[in-house]
């Protein structure tokens, strides 16, 4: 495991580095299918932008973006993020991307999510972690529910994609709910 930051059973999370821009990461953001439910794939994403973005992360305190890497073969399969971190309100937005299509549906997203939520609540002393997703993104909605998040509401026609507007659903979990939240296994 190279520079492991958080370690799970099947995966570990580590800091993104310049070598990730050389691999699949940059290609994921240029792939229409991978970005179906994301706000990416509007403008091309060149390697130079990937390098610049990765390097911009190192000194920031309002975002933690980590690479999701399989322990079995040390392959970078996606990214997970806590962003919009507020030290005043003790909250952050959660997001993730499994970019490697062969790794979807294998439980990696849930394992990475639990690692990141635990880090946010117990290491960073956050009180609320939330996420938003397009109303058509059933995988993310199911993941949020399987993590014990509650649906808070809907932002109407928030995202423009594929020539039309989509609603986004908002989910959140509070620190005191995290310990007692029932976790569904089918995420």
Image (spheres, rainbow, N blue to C red):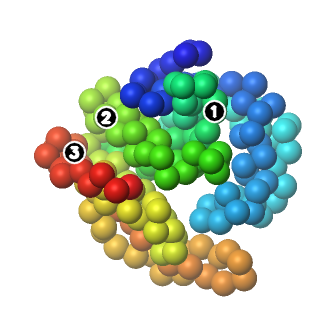
- Is the residue marked by circle 2 packed among few (<14), some (14-19), or many (20+) residues within 10 Å? some
Q: Is residue 131 left or right of residue 17?
A: left
Element type at mark 3: helix
Can you give x and y, in whole percent of width and height, for residue 9 in the image? Answer: 39, 28
Label 3 belongs to which residue? 178
Disc number at residue 161? none
Which of disc 2 and disc 1 is earlier in sequence?
A: 1
Disc number at residue 76? 1
Q: Gap between marks 1 and 2, in whole Å?
A: 21 Å
Based on the displayed image, in which of its 4 quarters is residue 17 positioned? Answer: top right
Dots 2 and 3: beta carbons under 8 Å?
yes
Residue 13 visible in rendering? no
Give the vertical position of 20 relative to 177 (above or below): above
Give the vertical position of 162 relative to 82 (above or below): below
Can you give x and y, in whole percent of width and height, for residue 27 in the image? Answer: 78, 46
Which of disc 3 and disc 1 is earlier in sequence?
A: 1
């Amino acid at each position: 495991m190279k520079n492991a930051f958080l370690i799970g059973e099947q995966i570990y999370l580590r800091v993104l580095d310049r070598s990730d821009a050389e691999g699949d990461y940059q290609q994921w953001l240029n792939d229409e299918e991978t970005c179906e439910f994301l706000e990416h794939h509007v403008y091309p994403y060149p390697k130079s932008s990937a390098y610049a973005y990765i390097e911009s992360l190192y000194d920031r305190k309002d975002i933690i973006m980590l690479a999701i890497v399989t322990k079995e073969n040390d392959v970078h399969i996606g990214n997970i993020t806590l962003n919009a971190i507020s030290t005043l309100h003790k909250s952050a937005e959660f997001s993730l991307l499994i970019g490697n299509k062969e790794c979807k549906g294998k439980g990696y997203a849930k394992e990475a999510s639990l690692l990141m939520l635990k880090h946010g609540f117990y290491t960073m002393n956050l009180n609320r972690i939330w996420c938003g997703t397009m109303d058509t993104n059933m995988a993310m909605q199911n993941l949020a529910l399987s993590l014990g998040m509650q649906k808070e509401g809907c932002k109407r026609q928030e995202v423009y994609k594929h020539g039309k507007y989509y609603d986004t659903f908002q989910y959140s979990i509070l620190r005191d709910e995290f310990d007692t939240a029932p976790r569904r296994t089918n995420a």
